C-alpha cells in the first residue's frame, strides 16, 4: 500500500519584508501565499485597519477553491516612552488621513507575532492574553 504524504507548509517571514511593501502589495503578497496553501508567520502585527482590508479582500476572493483565511495576532504591549511615541505616531497617521483622505503608503508593523493561514487548514485557534495555540491539519 502506497501512502501519500500530506504536508503543511509554513513560511516564517520577517516583518521587514512586509514593511517594504505598500498596503495593497502587502495584502496581495499575503493572499497569494495563503491561496497557495501556505501558513504565514511574521514577527509583526498589522494595524486594525489594514487587517480589516485584508479580510475584505479575502471575502472578495472566496470561492469553492479558496474558503478564506484565519488570522491570529499577538501584539507586544509596549510601555514607557516607546509606547507613548507609538500612540503619538498612530494619532499622527489618523490626522494625516483626516486632512488628506489617505493613509501613508508604507506603515511599520507593530511589535508582535501574526499567523495567517488558509481556513481549510486552520482548525482551531485558542487565544490567551499573552499567547495563542493553533491546531492545523490537512
Image (tube, rainbow, N blue to C red):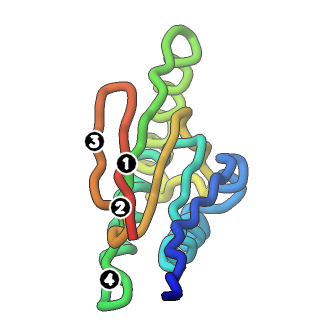
Q: Is residue 126 above or below residue 119?
A: above
Closer to the eye: label 2 or 4:
2
Q: Is residue 12 left or right of residue 4?
A: right
- CB under 8 Å between callouts 1 and 3? yes
Can you give x and y, in whole percent of width and height, for residue 6 in the image?
50, 74
Mark pair 4, 3: CA separation: 24 Å
Q: Earlier in the sequence, mark 2 or mark 4?
A: 4
Q: Is residue 101 above or below residue 64?
A: above
Can you give x and y, in whole percent of width and height, for residue 40 in the image?
54, 58
* Residue placed under numbered mark 1 in the picture: 134
Relative depth, front residue between 81 and 130? 130
* Residue placed under numbered mark 4 in the picture: 62
Can you give x and y, in whole percent of width and height, for residue 3 in the image?
50, 82
Closer to the eye: label 1 or 4:
1
Q: Is residue 94 above or below residue 82?
A: below
Secondary-structure class at tag 3: strand
Q: Which part of the image, by quadrant, shows the C terminus?
A: bottom left
Tell me the residue at 45%/58% (across/down).
116
Secondary-structure class at tag 4: loop
Mark pair 2, 4: CA separation: 16 Å
Q: Earlier in the sequence, mark 4 or mark 3?
A: 4
* Residue placed under numbered mark 2 in the picture: 122
Q: Earlier in the sequence, mark 1 or mark 4?
A: 4
* Residue placed under numbered mark 3 in the picture: 126
Amino acid at each position: 500500500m502506497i501512502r501519500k504524504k500530506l504536508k503543511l507548509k509554513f513560511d516564517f517571514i520577517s516583518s521587514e519584508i512586509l514593511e517594504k511593501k505598500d498596503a495593497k502589495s502587502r495584502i496581495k503578497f499575503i493572499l497569494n501565499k495563503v491561496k497557495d496553501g501556505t501558513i504565514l508567520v511574521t514577527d509583526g502585527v498589522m494595524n486594525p485597519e489594514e487587517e480589516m482590508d485584508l479580510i475584505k479582500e479575502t471575502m472578495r476572493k472566496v470561492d469553492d477553491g479558496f474558503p478564506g483565511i484565519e488570522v491570529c495576532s499577538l501584539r507586544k504591549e509596549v510601555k514607557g516612552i516607546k509606547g507613548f511615541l507609538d500612540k503619538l505616531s498612530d494619532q499622527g497617521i489618523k490626522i494625516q488621513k483626516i486632512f488628506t483622505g489617505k493613509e501613508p503608503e508604507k506603515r511599520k508593523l507593530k511589535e508582535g507575532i501574526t499567523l495567517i493561514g488558509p481556513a481549510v487548514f486552520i482548525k482551531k485557534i485558542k487565544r490567551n492574553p499573552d499567547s495563542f495555540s493553533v491546531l492545523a491539519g490537512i
